[in-house]
Image (cartoon, rainbow, N blue to C red):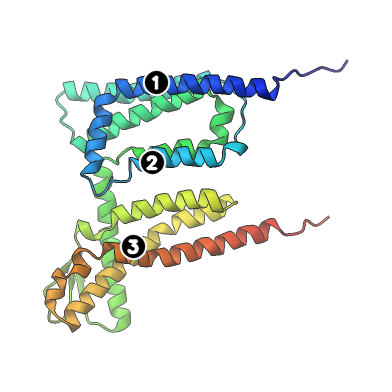
């Protein structure tokens, strides 16, 4: 005896989805009210932070990605209560951990406080999405929902670690470029000694963490939109790190050569103080060339005839 599978008509499915989206909008508003103070603090923080100035754009980018891919996302609502409960527990645990830490004498930096509160908010939002939309919709729109993690400012310890990594690797790369072009140089940690000019010190502002983070996020979005295969997306995103190191080293080398061959006063020139956007733009050339190359490989691989 054949079994019959009953499914909702498409119009009814869309009606159910619309109703659940309305509930999600209401729950999101309630979440924003509950987290009103930390969210307002986050907005004020980003308005005065060069590193995290991109955060207000993250929800807009996520919404745009969902809108552009809406035809590929299922309209079937299948609430995933287990996922919702897990996300709610994690969100509540983060908020409770902050509360207990505060009452235990912990005095976090403003950035760390915003990290915990924003992360708690994001988990509560994910929990609401799992509970109201379900795992199928969350699976189809996994990237836009996961992209919301960039709305969480990194804790101070992470920023310090990333800064230190790029300072060390950039100083090493700059010394290598100086050696390749024949300029005599000595390096002592983050200090680079050049002939006839004061020593160059690769400080935290030389790490380029802001532009690197923006480039990393751009690579994620561009890979999601324009590349088909996971391995090409992974290569494209990972390539941001060596590209950032090379950009920083090249910038240090340019400034050093200007100091040696023109004047030591070039250390205070606009190319040093305000030249970040120029070197970021230069880094976009190999960035987009790599994207074009990987995109071509993607299409060539997908168009290969299948052997019978």
Q: Earlier in the sequence, mark 1 or mark 2?
A: 2
Q: How far, Cα to Cα, is label 1 from label 3? A: 41 Å
Q: Nearer the viewer, mark 1 or mark 3?
A: 3
Q: Which residue appears at 56% of the width and 40% of the height?
A: 69
| Label 1 packing within 10 angstroms: few (<14), some (14-19), many (20+) | some
Quarter of the image where the N terminus is located: top right
**Which structural element holds mark 1?**
helix
Camera sees residue 100: yes
Q: Position of residue 118 (x, y in %)?
A: 31, 31
Tag nearer the camera, 1 or 2: 2
Residue under the point 67% across and 59% down: 301
Q: Is residue 278 left or right of residue 87?
A: left
Expressed as whole percent of the image width and height from the top left, the position of residue 78 reads: 59, 22
Q: Nearer the viewer, residue 174 or 60?
A: 60
Label 2, label 3: how far apart the Cα atoms are: 20 Å
Mark with earlier residue (2, 3): 2
Name the element at disc 2.
Answer: helix
- The numbered mark at residue 58 is 2
Q: Residue at x 41, y 49 (%)?
A: 217
Q: Are marks 1 and 2 in contact (CB under 8 Å)?
A: no
Q: Label 3, on which residue?
A: 280
Q: Is residue 129 left or right of residue 162?
A: right
Residue 242 lies in quadrant: bottom left
- Give the CA separation, mark 1 to mark 2: 24 Å
Which quadrant holds the C terminus?
bottom right
Residue 80 shows in this picture: no
Mark positioned earlier in the residue sequence (1 or 3): 1
For residue 89, the mark is 1
Of 270 and 85, the residue lying toward us: 270
Q: Is residue 93 left or right of residue 128?
A: left
- 24 relative to 304, above or below: above
Tell me if mark 2 has few (under 14), some (14-19) or many (20+) residues whose alpha carbon lies within 10 angstroms of its own.
some
């Amino acid at each position: 005896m054949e079994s019959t599978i009953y499914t909702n008509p498409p119009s009814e499915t869309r009606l159910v989805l619309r109703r659940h989206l309305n509930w999600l909008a209401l729950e999101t508003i309630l979440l924003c009210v509950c987290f009103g103070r930390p969210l307002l603090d986050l907005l004020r923080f980003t308005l005065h932070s060069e590193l995290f100035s991109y955060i207000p754009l993250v929800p807009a980018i996520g919404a745009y990605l969902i809108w552009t891919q809406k035809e590929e996302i299922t309209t079937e609502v299948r609430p995933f209560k287990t996922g919702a409960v897990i996300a709610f527990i994690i969100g509540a645990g983060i908020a409770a951990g902050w509360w207990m830490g505060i009452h235990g004498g912990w005095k976090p930096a403003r950035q760390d406080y915003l990290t915990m509160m924003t992360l708690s908010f994001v988990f509560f939002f994910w929990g609401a999405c799992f509970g109201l939309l379900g795992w199928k919709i969350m699976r189809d729109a996994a990237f836009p929902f996961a992209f919301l993690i960039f709305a969480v400012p990194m804790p101070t310890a992470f920023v310090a670690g990333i800064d230190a990594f790029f300072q060390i690797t950039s100083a090493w790369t700059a010394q290598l470029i100086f050696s390749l072009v024949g300029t005599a140089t000595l390096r002592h940690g983050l200090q680079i000694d050049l002939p006839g000019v004061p020593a160059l010190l690769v400080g935290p502002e030389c790490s380029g963490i802001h532009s690197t983070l923006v480039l990393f996020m751009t690579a994620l979005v561009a890979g999601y939109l324009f590349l088909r295969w996971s391995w090409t997306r992974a290569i494209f995103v990972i390539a941001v790190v060596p590209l950032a190191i090379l950009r920083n080293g090249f910038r240090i080398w340019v400034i050093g050569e200007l100091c040696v061959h023109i004047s030591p006063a070039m250390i205070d020139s606009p190319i040093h103080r305000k030249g970040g956007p120029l070197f970021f733009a230069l880094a976009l050339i190999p960035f987009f060339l790599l994207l074009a190359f990987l995109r071509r490989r993607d299409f060539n691989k997908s168009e290969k005839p299948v052997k019978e």
